[in-house]
Amino acid sequence: MKPLVILLVPVLIIIQSLHADEPVITVTNQNLAYVRETRSMEVKNGIFNYAVTDLPVLLDPVTSLFTSGNTDFQVLEKFFEFDLTDLNSLLRRAVGTNITVASEQSTIRGALIAFDGNFLFIETSDSVLQVTMRSPNTRISFDDLGKNYAKVPTLRIIAASKSSGTLEFILSYLTRGMSWIAEYNALYYEKSSIIDLSAQVALSNNSGKSFKQARLRLMAGELHEAQAPSASYLQRKMVAEAVVGMIAEEPAPISEYKIFDLPQLTDLPDQQTRYIRFIHPGKLTVKKQYIYDYQIDDQGVNVSLTAMNDESSGIGLPLPKGTVRIYLADDQTEYIGADHLAHTAVDEKIVINIGKAFDLKAERKVLEQKKVSKNAEQMTVRVELRNHKEESVEILVREQIPYYRSFEIINSSHPVTERDARNVAFNIPVSANKTESLTYTILFSW
């Protein structure tokens, strides 16, 4: 950081509180937001200092840009100040100024000469150097309040202008501490295989600045960052909740991402999470599937709901990642499970895992395993499926193949229904209150 005294030309100091008019905030789901605010300043002909306040504590000053249509105005230098981080920051700024150090034993007042982790070095008014120990019981008072540190986040600039007057400009910057995630509610009508899917957005602002009547844009996607800027201070986690009624418009593609524009302005108080209505309820045709994969659960049968995210199934919109909570809604509404949904493009498959089937059990045994040649091995497997329900079910038995092996099913009690390089699967019908066994022999080679 260069001191202002290095300039060899007259400097006019201008400090003014700026008024932000309808900020536009693009919030990512990676704890990062891009803010654009319309502001104004009184400029003077020549070179002057300007202090921009009302900023987030977690602002990344490197990313701050001043944009205006006035070619006579230029920003020459800028630096960010906010020193209420910890005691060491305050002491660094106070070197050379008067402080008072009080303890149970004594009170010392004088100019702070130096300090380290254990001691304070103070020169008193009679030119005596006093050394006092720092301790949790020591009370330190600073004389020059507001002169030696910035009480609020402040972006200071050195600017040049060829004219005087009021200049309107766009201040844009990146800030940490803002993020969002979709929260889905799914009313599952099991008898008709329909889900009413709706969503709200949980938008958190922990940036250190409150925004009034902001226009929100939500970016969905996985951004790559060279290096995350460090936080300016440790934020207190005090989260409040509010609900705002909004519906996102059709998302617009930006590069490899999707942007959801919320149609109305909203307030974003600091240290608050707001829950904003995001997607109208839409009907989605789903299929219930029972899956047994011994490498995931050696006895339990998992239950999932699957659908295609297309117009024929009922939604056909890009779905950002989030948590899906499922409620059974045929007779009376009951919560039956939740899962995490990844970013899902149109025409991609949706899979929602809702838990384990209470009345379905599976047991897998290796009946035989033998080496048939130097680079081949044969294994016979039996999977016993027990159905304690009052209706028949179909269970997908999935077997994962080691990545370094080729394989061939040489004998099986049921046909293979799915196969790729790493998996083989069988659809096994199991009658009500019955047991069905799958037996197959597989030949591995490498």
Image (tube, rainbow, N blue to C red):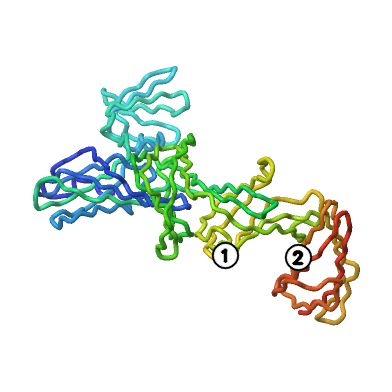
Q: Which mark is residue 304?
A: none
Callout 1 amino acid: Glu
Image coordinates of residue 426 in percent, x first then y, are: 78, 68
Image coordinates of residue 174 in percent, x first then y, are: 36, 51
Callout 2 amino acid: Arg
In this figure, what is the number of numbered marks?
A: 2
Q: Nearer the viewer, residue 27 or 231?
A: 27
Pick whichever of labels 2 and 1 is earlier in the sequence.
1
265 is higher (above) or lower (below) than 371: above
Residue in the picture at 83% in, 81% down:
374
Residue identified by numbered label 1: 348
- Residue 48 in the figure: left or right of residue 423: left
322 is higher (above) or lower (below) than 85: below
Image coordinates of residue 186 in percent, x first then y, are: 60, 49
Residue identified by numbered label 2: 398
Q: Quadrant of residue 377?
A: bottom right
